[in-house]
Amino acid sequence: MKRDTDPTLVISLGRNGRVSYPDRCWEEIEPVLRRMWEFDGRMCAWHDVRAAVQAAWRAGDGVDAQRGRRRMLENRAA
């Protein structure tokens, strides 16, 4: 029987995946994240955590947009 999974680990996978591949879409990166997840056979199945990982990934969309706006404003001020 597989153990319960720490939610922090699931969120970290999504966030770190976004940081590592900022210009890639979810559909391209999901197989990479899935392989990383499944590498440790003690974890629960990918289909059990996929939605949470994807939500953490998508949360990075707003952060990236804010950073881009901030850089644009900084460049205008300079």
Image (cartoon, rainbow, N blue to C red):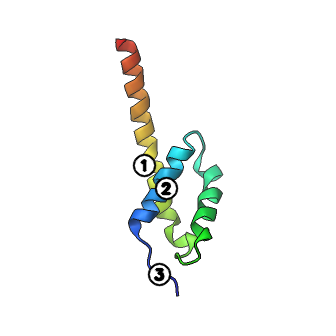
Q: Quadrant of residue 6?
A: bottom left
- Looking at numbered disc 1 in the image, what kind of residue is underneath it? Ala
| Residue 14 spot, x, y in % from top left | 49, 55
Please name the residue shown 40% across and 67% down the image.
7
- Looking at numbered disc 2 in the image, what kind of residue is underneath it? Gly
Please name the residue shown 62% across and 69% down the image.
39
Q: Rounded to the nearest whole Å, what is the CA distance between mark 3 and mark 2?
A: 20 Å
Q: Quadrant of residue 63?
A: top left
Q: Are marks 1 and 2 in contact (CB under 8 Å)?
A: yes
Question: Which label's residue is closer to the chain start, 3 or 2?
Answer: 3
Query: Mark 2: which secondary structure?
Result: helix
Please name the residue shown 60% across and 43% down the image.
24
Q: Of all residues shown, which one is farthest toward the bottom?
A: 1
**Which label sits in the foreground, 1 or 2?**
2
| Residue 78 spot, x, y in % from top left | 37, 11
Q: Residues within 10 Å of mark 2 (few under 14, many from 20)?
A: many
Q: Quadrant of residue 69?
A: top left
The residue beneath circle 2 is 14
Q: Rounded to the nearest whole Å, what is the CA distance between mark 1 and mark 2?
A: 9 Å
The residue beneath circle 3 is 3
- Looking at numbered disc 3 in the image, what kind of residue is underneath it? Arg
Q: Rounded to the nearest whole Å, what is the CA distance between mark 3 and mark 1?
A: 26 Å
| Residue 16 spot, x, y in % from top left | 49, 51
Instruction: Say left or right for 36 vs 64.
Output: right
